[in-house]
Amino acid sequence: MLDESVAERYAGALFEVSEACGKTDLWDKKLSQIAKSVEDTPFLSKFLKYPFGSASEKKDIMKKVFGTFIDVQIMNFIFIIIDRGRASYLDLISKKYSECIKQSRGIVSAEVISAAPLSPSERARLARVLTQKEGRKVEPSFSCDPSLIGGVVIKMGGRVIDGSLSRALSIMKEKFANVDVSAVAGA
């Protein structure tokens, strides 16, 4: 499991440089495309994450694959990540970089997990309610997990709001497990 604080430090540093250059959105787009391409290409992904490959070989491959596609500054940033043995963090750094941009614009990301797919109107309503409660714009992403049985789980700003039926049943189970049946039967 990757340490998110490592990715946050690299993303934060890249964000500061991109702001100074006025290229935050362009670099966000390019970095996310590179990260996705690496993740979608099993050979490239394994090669970059393999701890025994040399940094110069990894940098040569990245330059050949993405050299004409990206700015020199982004390529240099990727080289730094490779030199420091953090190539496996590329996807997470990309996501954290996008979060830095959103945060600078007063936007909060939220992950909404529901037991069943939400309709477009339910998604829009939930986004409005979350924005209202947070006092700033909330951009939710949606996914499904049938094990929730019903309801939703919302992960936002380091908080988890668990309104799932599976959690409610778990709480009830814990309460019933702590009931002294002999005291109830004797009454």
Image: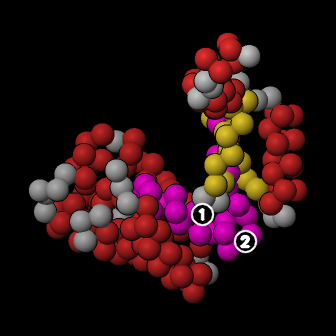
> Could you tell me which secondary element the residue under label 2 belongs to?
loop
Q: Looking at the image, how many numbered discs can be counted on the residues?
A: 2
Residue 14 x/y as whole percent: 48, 76
Q: Is residue 39 left or right of residue 153?
A: left
Residue drawn at x 58%, y 76% is 23
How is the model colour-coded? secondary structure
Of the pair 11 and 30, the residue shown nearer to us: 11
Residue 8 x/y as whole percent: 47, 68
- Can you identify the residue that label 2 sits on? 105
- The amino acid at mark 1 is Glu
Say whether residue 42 is visible.
yes
Q: Is residue 52 left or right of residue 178?
A: left
- Can you identify the residue that label 1 sits on? 99
> Could you tell me which secondary element the residue under label 1 belongs to?
helix
Query: Callout 2: 10 Å neighbours few (<14), some, many (20+)?
Result: few
Residue drawn at x 87%, y 34% is 121
Q: What range of the chain is rendered magenta? A: 90-117
Query: Callout 1: 10 Å neighbours few (<14), some, many (20+)?
Result: many
Kindly report the distance in space between the C-alpha atoms of the residues bearing marks 2 and 1. 10 Å
Quadrant in which residue 69 is drawn? bottom left
| Residue 40 vertical position relative to residue 98 in the rendered view, above or below | above
Of the pair 31 and 102, the residue shown nearer to us: 102
| Residue 33 vertical position relative to residue 116 in the rendered view, above or below | below
